[in-house]
Amino acid sequence: MASAANKKSKLIYTLAAWTISGMIFFPILWTLITSFKTEAEAISATPALFAFDWTLENYQDVLARSPYFDHFWNSVVISLGSSLLGLLIAVPAAWSMAFVQTKKTKNLLMWMLSTKMLPPVGVLIPIYLLFRDFALLDTKLGLVIVMTLINLPIMVWMLYTYFREIPGEILEASRMDGATIGEEIFHVLLPIALPGIASTLLLNVILAWNEAFWTLILTAANAAPLTAFIASYSSPEGLFYAKLSAASAMAIVPILILGWFSQKQLVRGLSFGAVK
């Protein structure tokens, strides 16, 4: 009886998981399929899912109209640069909160997390004026700074949960052997926490890659990443759905591939410390 009930529960959970996964993936699948349609087929009142004349015309038009690889390179520099800069700040911050705790540590962590609840538009004007005065508008450096700041709370929280799982006795032993704080972090802590650091880095790359609000506000042409590249296909004349889908597919496929190959690290990073 118990075995049959367990199998039934497992089947229900499996079906629910596949259903939810299908609902999440369907918009991506629809975008990919639409990118191979003509504009007439894309806006048809009864769009066909597979039975249509497949074409690469939209991809050819997108590549001919826009410098895709310039936008792609900007996305790589901004997402990777902000992730590495964030790690330089988040690692020592998470170390101090995990191993040199005070009565205010938890309050500080909660305050950092609460900043993610602030609507970006609430700080739009001061950030825009600061960027204008420091000549950071439409620069990759400016976007690296912004991406670092907006994703830093998540990076600190993820690293904090990893560091809390490391026995403090290991670090105490290194101190007894005469290790300095820098040696303790770089030669003892980082090698042990490398999986957590890698998953934190990967998650931040994905978040920075997908950020659209700040990229559309703070860039024009020189530093515009792929999110701005997609937005360029919305014009006063209307939306070109097929070309917009092609541009979207060219922007999301690289990060989908990265996410697919690093899914184990990402899942472990997001769930680590959840069950104790």
Image: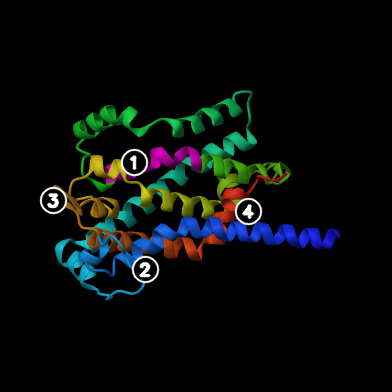
For marks 4 and 1, the one nearer the N-term is 1
Looking at the picture, how far across and down is residue 244, in whole percent? 25, 58
Circle 1 sits on which residue?
145
Looking at the picture, how far across and down is residue 67, in whole percent? 19, 61
Front in this rendered view, residue 17 or 184 = 17
For marks 3 and 4, the one nearer the N-term is 4
- The region drawn magenta spans 141-154
Q: Does residue 214 sit above or below 39 in this rendering?
A: above
Relative horizontal placement of residue 40, taking residue 33 as reference (left or right): left
On residue 110, the disc is: none
Query: What count of labels does the image hold?
Result: 4
Mark closer to the observer (4, 2)? 2
For marks 2 and 3, the one nearer the N-term is 2
Q: Does the magenta stretch include residue 151?
A: yes
Measured in 3D between alpha carbons, the distance from the residue under mark 2 to the one under mark 1, in whole angstroms, is: 42 Å
Of all residues shown, which one is farthest toward the top? 103
Q: Tags 4 and 2 in contact by the CB under 8 Å rule?
A: no
Quadrant showing the N terminus: bottom right
Mark closer to the observer (3, 1)? 3
On residue 237, the disc is: 3
Of all residues shown, which one is farthest toward the left? 237
Measured in 3D between alpha carbons, the distance from the residue under mark 4 to the one under mark 2, in whole angstroms, is: 49 Å
Residue 182 picture quarter: top right
Circle 4 sits on which residue?
192
